[in-house]
Amino acid sequence: MIFLPLGRRPDLAKWAARDFPPAALQGPLPTDDHDRHARVVAHEPPGDPRPDGAFRRVATAIGEYRVFPPSLLTRVMARVPVAVGDTVGLTYPLLPGLRMFVASRVTEVFDGPADRTCRAGFTYRTLAGHAELGEETFAVEKDRATGEITVSLTAWSRPGHWLTRIGYWYARWCQLHAGRSALDYLAAVARGDDHGP
């Protein structure tokens, strides 16, 4: 976790050299926070996703890590779309003129058929020094029988820094707020209301 004064750019390269904390490699514990945010955001005709449809718009946004409203969180990336092994970061405004910067590493990218659905997205795991310890998956799924398109964020986490443990209630509020805001943002992407930066 790095605090950035106004105007200072985050250094993603320093985070790219970091490893996963050993506790993150052990996976989730029963006492961890387990979240699943999901929402139906659109419908397409049954069958495979339309090349110009809502599924593909959301899949592209997720692949570019355009998951959260830019007014809430700012993404920091070396390239788009994300690939396994990439380090990606987020800045979050804490106080006027002060932002927090954290980073994670992509561990899985998927885009293709899965049972009765088509599914696209990625998973990342927090790096050593992140405010939280855990994993999160961002996904969009189309039911090929009904045409229903659902976005989801699933995660497990626990405090990864002493400041997060002290301010657990605030950190937890931020997590839940970010998850709900991501669904709102991706619903707008599905409608074609947001075309990214």
Image: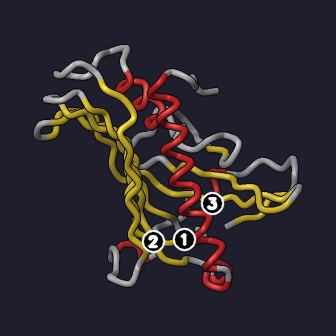
Q: In the rendering, which numbered label is found on residue 157?
A: 2
Mark 2 neighbour density, 10 Å: few (under 14) some (14–19) many (20 or more): many
Q: Mark 1 and mark 2 in contact (Cβ < 8 Å)?
A: yes
Percent of width and height locating residue 195: 57, 22
Q: Quadrant of residue 177?
A: bottom right
Element under label 3?
strand
Element under label 1?
strand
Give the Cα separation between the discs numbered 3 and 2.
14 Å
Observer-nearest residue: 48 or 97? 48
Residue at image x 52%, y 50%?
87
Q: Mark 1 and mark 3 in contact (Cβ < 8 Å)?
A: yes
Observer able to see residue 18: yes
Give the Cα separation between the discs numbered 3 and 1.
9 Å
Residue at image x 58%, y 25%?
194
Percent of width and height locating residue 129: 60, 71
Q: Quadrant of the C terminus?
A: top right
Amino acid identity at mark 3: Val
Amino acid identity at mark 2: Ser
Q: Going by the image, does 97 lie left or right of 25? A: right
The residue indicated by pointer 3 is 102
Q: Quadrant of residue 24?
A: bottom left
Q: Going by the image, does 82 lie left or right of 40? A: right
Percent of width and height locating residue 30: 32, 82
Amino acid identity at mark 1: Glu
Q: Quick one: which residue is furthest to the top in this view? A: 52
Disc with the residue nearer the chain's start (2 vs 1): 1
Observer-nearest residue: 169 or 121? 169
Percent of width and height locating residue 161: 61, 79
The residue indicated by pointer 1 is 132
